[in-house]
Amino acid sequence: AYKFWATQPVPKFGDDGDPNKPIEEGPIETRTVDDVPKSPAPLINGFEWCDIDLTDDGELKEVWELLNGHYVEDNEAMFRFNYSPSILKWAMMPPGWKKQWHRGVRASQSRKLVAFIAAIPVELRIRTNVLHASEVNLLCIHKKLRSKRLAPVLIKEITRLCNLEGVWQAIYTGGVVLPKPVSTCRYYHRAINWQKLYEVGFSPLPPNSKPSFQVRKYAVPDRTSTPGLREMQKKDVNAVQDLLTRYLAKYDMASEWDKAEVEHWLLHNKKDALEEQVVWSYVVEDAHKRITDFISFYCLESSVINHPKHKNVRAAYLFYYATETGLTTPVDKDALKARLNELVADSLVYCKKANFDVYNALSLMDNGLFLEDQKFGPGDGQLHYYLFNYKANPIAGGVDKRNRL
Ligand code: YNC
Ligand code: MG
């Protein structure tokens, strides 16, 4: 098992060591740019490597088409992620993005795009070490080319392209189990449009319940309740960056964002009016004009596969948040729990206004303090976090195990 992964600089299952004696964290192997091949490994006959230019609307559409037909599905093949062209730009072109890290495979004859893999730069802190790393995502192979060992070729190619830029560590996530997760989270879902989620087969009708009861259970108020809550604006970037940096400091693993990254990830200045909104961010400004809290979510639709009535499910994903309430010493856990519940409840109001069907969150950060109260229920999906070429002690998820099924 794991014929490919056994050859890569990742931790193996089994060599767990002594749980009471933490290992020393650091790179698994060290090399230099001179050791890195300057050209890609050859592909199977009939296929060739290509750079993908996401600033070109035609190429962006080709990537969208490949992912729309062939990217991640749930276990029952009922839903498939449908990254919109706007989300692809947002996710793959943050500050410092590199064109050469958007890599494709084309059929030589037809020129059709049949596979894709991408990376973006990220400053990743693991405990006290900050790694100049990459985040690898959107690995996708056309269904007709599956199980031909093409995935390892794509992974080795993106590794080569990262290495050429002096980047030796990466973070990536996936629903599949590989050697060896550094952390594992569960997906939680909060119904907004319960009736639709029921019709597409996402939400079950619990025994002894009725549809009308479920609809009432998931009703969302029309108005927010937190005083001072408003849309985040460009003038808030400095304050939000400062607040977020202090808030994330308590976690063992987190990205470090400079101001340009905060602006990109939370405001995503749209380049033209036709682009759809991908991220929604709100701040709380107090009477002294200080930013005391912020919360954000992004949009990622899923296609409903073969459904007579519904074509897609509009899902909002809880993104970053931070609150001064969590930054007192010592932390007042009851106050933090109350504050996060207010913020998340209000973000739900905005989700509903923006016509989302479901609100998704992971069992990370302080989400365990509000998931149950805000009527998020555990899904069957897990998300495993992996580090490439870095050994680290396990990182605990944030959620109390009692919340899980
Ligand atoms: C996966 N998701 O285990 P072994 S997530 C990593 N991530 O290798 P083949 C994966 N490896 O077990 P297929 C993987 N899925 O023999 C499978 N593998 O060691 C491994 N699905 O290759 C697998 N996107 O080509 C096995 O498999 C080997 O044709 C088998 O292709 C796989 O983006 C895949 O789920 C996933 O498009 C491309 O099924 C295909 O099945 C597909 O015979 C639907 O491959 C879409 C989908 C994955 C979403 C994601 C993160 C990817 C991370 C990749 C690893 C990055 C490492 C860091 C590199 C940079 C380093 C630096 C610096
Ligand atoms: Mg293959």
Image (spheres, grey):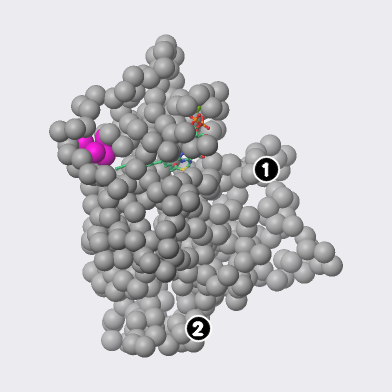
List the single residue furthest toward the front. Answer: 18
The answer to whether 400 appears left or right of 394 in the picture is: right
The Cα atoms of the two marked residues, 2 and 1, are separated by 37 Å
Which numbered tag is attached to residue 44? none
| Residue 148 pos. (x, y %) | 50, 24
Task: Name the residue that disc number 1 marks.
Answer: 76
Neighbour tally class for label 2: few under 14, some 14-19, many 20 plus, Cα within 10 Å: few
Is the residue at mark 1 in contact range of ligand 1, meaning its CB lies under 8 Å from it? no
* Helix, strand or loop under label 2: helix
Foreground of the two, 347 or 160 = 160
Examine the rendering and report whether any part of residue 62 can be seen: no
Q: Quadrant of residue 355?
A: bottom right
Task: Name the residue that disc number 2 marks.
Answer: 338
Question: Residue drawn 34% across and 43% down?
Answer: 9
Whether 175 is drawn above or below 345: the answer is above
Foreground of the two, 25 or 44 = 25
| Residue 108 pos. (x, y %) | 39, 14
Neighbour tally class for label 1: few under 14, some 14-19, many 20 plus, Cα within 10 Å: few
Q: Earlier in the sequence, mark 2 or mark 1?
A: 1
List the single residue furthest toward the left. Answer: 34
Q: Quadrant of residue 49?
A: top left
Is residue 67 covered in magenta? no
The answer to whether 306 appears left or right of 342 in the picture is: right
Amino acid beneath label 2: Ala
| Residue 304 pos. (x, y %) | 64, 43
Amino acid beneath label 1: Glu
Q: Look at the image and give the residue range highlighted in magenta.
A: 161-165
The answer to whether 361 appears left or right of 212 in the picture is: left
